[in-house]
Image: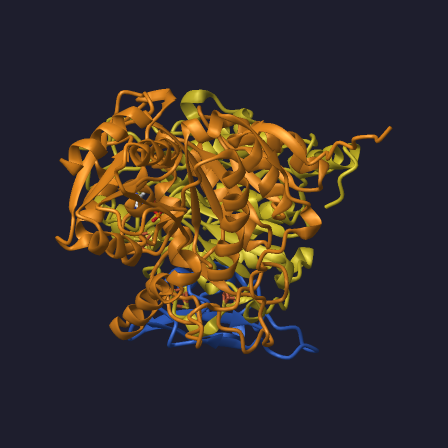
Chain colours: A blue, B yellow, C orange
Amino acid sequence: MSKTKDNEAPPVIEINAEWCKGCSICIEYCPQDVLALENGIAVVVNLDDCNRCQLCDYRCPDYAITVK
Amino acid sequence: MDNFDYTTFLREKKFPLIWCAGCGHGIIMKAILRAVGRVGWDQNDTVMVSGIGCSSRMPGYVDMNTLHTTHGRAIPFATGVKMANPDLHVIVITGDGDATAIGGNHFIHAARRNIDLTVVLLNNTIYGMTGGQVSPTTPRGKKASTASFGNVEAPFNISGLAQAAGASFVARGTAYGAVQLSKYIEKGLLKKGLSVIEAMSPCPTVFGRRNKMKSPVEMYDELRDQSVPVKKAATMSEVELEDKIVTGVLTDVDKPEYTAEYAKLIAKLGGSA
Amino acid sequence: MPVTKRNPRVRVMTGNEACAEAALAAGLKFFGGYPITPSSEIAEELSTKLPASGGKFIQMEDEIAAMGSVIGASLAGAKSMTATSGPGFSLKQENIGYACLTEVPCVIVNVMRGGPSTGLPTMPQQSDVMQARWGTHGDHPIIVLVPQSVAETVELTIRAFHLTEKYRIPVILLMDETVGHISEKITLPDPAEVKIYERQKPTVSPDEYLPYKHTESDIPEMASFGTGYRFHVTGLCHDQTGFPTNDPVEIEKQMLRINRKLERYRDDIIEVETAGDADAEIGVFAYGSTARSAKRAMLMAQEKGIKVSFLRPRTMWPFPDREVLAMGEAVKKIVVPEMNLGQVAHEIEWAVRGKAEVVKVNKINGEPISPIEILAAIEKAVQ
Ligand SMILES: Cc1ncc(C[n+]2csc(CCOP(=O)(O)OP(=O)(O)O)c2C)c(N)n1
Ligand code: SF4
Ligand code: SF4
Ligand code: SF4
């Protein structure tokens, strides 16, 4: 089930591949398993489940991921 | 959920950050910037002062008035800035070695004076920049490049030190608990007096690897498992609290602040600044 | 009956008190210090007078902190100073180097006592002349002024602020214990009449501002924190933007620029006093309180028919090498009395390039060098 309310636009997750160092922190602590590591860079694999908690953003040491 | 825009406070041209993959310092920098954003400080009126170390590289990335000083001496430089212009907001960025080994004297005296600085102390329990030597906060038994057989010394309790020395605000948070950490920092920014926010920061590269933690995530897991909120800690015994990290606001008191007291002295003497 | 009006600025005071008064007249706004004999009176005076004039005084927890606070205050726009002596001067060195590299104006007073270590706290030596020049690591520019009297302490304290603000080079006022503690009658300057150079503020907008720009003058414009110019200051080698750089070309360019200021502006920075006979065979070079004994010795020698010339630096560093060479070319021998084992004599030997013999007169037992002792050296030199 999508976590986005019907009247809301879906979340926009931006990942800056230039800055991402592939530490996996965002991936491991995402409560919804939205993210994964591909070739050493974080990628979105399950946008539908994102609940916009922004924990990935808070915990990314490298300013490589933002959620809007 | 908020729409905080880091870019206002970043010198993006200097990115990517110098820090290693998974280093907690970047997370703590975010917690600081979000806190500054919430209190609404103008970056023109805000000064970020640091010493030397991985942690102290932070000001280079932050679009404020920034001052990267000598090892251990951020607090004295910041004291001069704040005294010369008390209207400026002054944030000090320092490491466990920077603030409590070489700079220990300045740290306790700033707390005693209760001068209005916000000190964010990034505690990674190791000397990161110089390659993993033992620090005053390295836990007993942990390995360092100058403690190959495990540290035989007792570590400092940094927050306890700040409390005992007279800081008016002391809190401890972690890079894992980044949301709460940012809230503690916000309180510290608003406090008139010396605020110390001890922020536990994993160093995967020179601490983790040497101490059998293979990935950054393992270190964050450990931080999570060790953290005990201050209220819960009050119900636990000393033995239970061994190896635990007590998080939360530990001290929050109002007492005379140094630059305000000095301004009163100037007024009494009829001087005008 | 005529009423004699006393000029309130004519006073009897020590060199240390005069230094504090002169700093205030020069516009001092921040002093960070730590007590140490024989400099403490400077801090004591300023602890009462600075706040009364709207400035700030702080006694820090040590000299390292004091020096750091001075640099921070200067970056926030305040004319800043610290004062210390021997052991404290050693502690300040790392942060003095920081001020040299980052070109932060500040005045450091060192009232020299006997050293090394705790040495002779209450007795004079001139033992830190080389440390004042080379105390911190790395090639760096520094200006060192050496007053010989209370009156000259006033002049050179004001000049120290003038030079540091003008060139963005830290200035050390190197007094000896005798100058710091001797009481003399002087006329204090009228602060309204003290004109010193104010640091050059940016003439460009924050967007265009480069804190370490290569300019025609070699002296970058200096913004203060809190004025809208959000610049970065670091003790790492930096480029024009102020951020660290590893580019060998830019590192060299910046290092040469900061060091070049000394040579380029030497004629404005260096001041010497010359006296004596133009056709002398013996020269005397002396500085600080020792210069007063030396001048007396010169007069005594002249009474005995010996022709003597006299050279006294008010600026010790950069070294007045051309002035010394000129003396070396005119005389056969240069007598150099100093309360150390010959620190400046070596510099003179280098400067005169074999044109004259250097005769050292040294004393390190805490007693000043008397005119008689210098006279004896002069008499021996003419034989
Ligand atoms: C006077 C001086 N001594 C030693 C050093 C070398 N040094 C640089 S950083 C550092 C330790 C930094 O450790 P910490 O403050 O814990 O910061 P971290 O790098 O772990 O963030 C040391 C010893 C120095 N720069 N200056
Ligand atoms: S916002 Fe929350 S749910 Fe969405 S990707 Fe980030 S951590 Fe996962
Ligand atoms: S936390 Fe940031 S740097 Fe680490 S993998 Fe995720 S996006 Fe990349
Ligand atoms: S060495 Fe440690 S503290 Fe330094 S950047 Fe790397 S992970 Fe961070």
- Would residue B57 appear left or right of C380 to someone viewing this image? right
Q: Nearer the viewer, residue C18 or B90?
A: C18
Farthest right residue in view: C1
**Quadrant of ligand 1 in image:** top left
Q: Residue at x 46, y 45 (%)?
A: B74
Q: Give how far across and how far down residue B184 sits, in percent.
A: 59, 45
Residue B250 seen anywhere in this rendered image of the structure: no
Q: How many numbered marks are there?
A: 0
Residue C105 seen anywhere in this rendered image of the structure: yes
Q: Residue at x 50, y 39 (%)?
A: C153
Which quadrant holds residue C195? bottom right
Q: Nearer the viewer, residue B63 or B151?
A: B63
- Would residue C93 appear left or right of C70 to someone viewing this image? left
Q: Give how far across and how far down residue C71 sits, in percent.
A: 49, 48
Residue C272 vs C377, above or below: the answer is below
Q: Nearer the viewer, residue C342 or C33?
A: C342
Q: Residue at x 44, y 21 (%)?
A: B238
Quadrant for the N terminus of chain C, please: top right
Q: Give how far across and how far down residue B122 sits, in percent.
A: 43, 46
Q: Residue at x 66, y 62 (%)?
A: B42
Q: Nearer the viewer, residue C185 or B12?
A: C185
Q: Give how far across and how far down residue B188 sits, in percent.
A: 61, 44
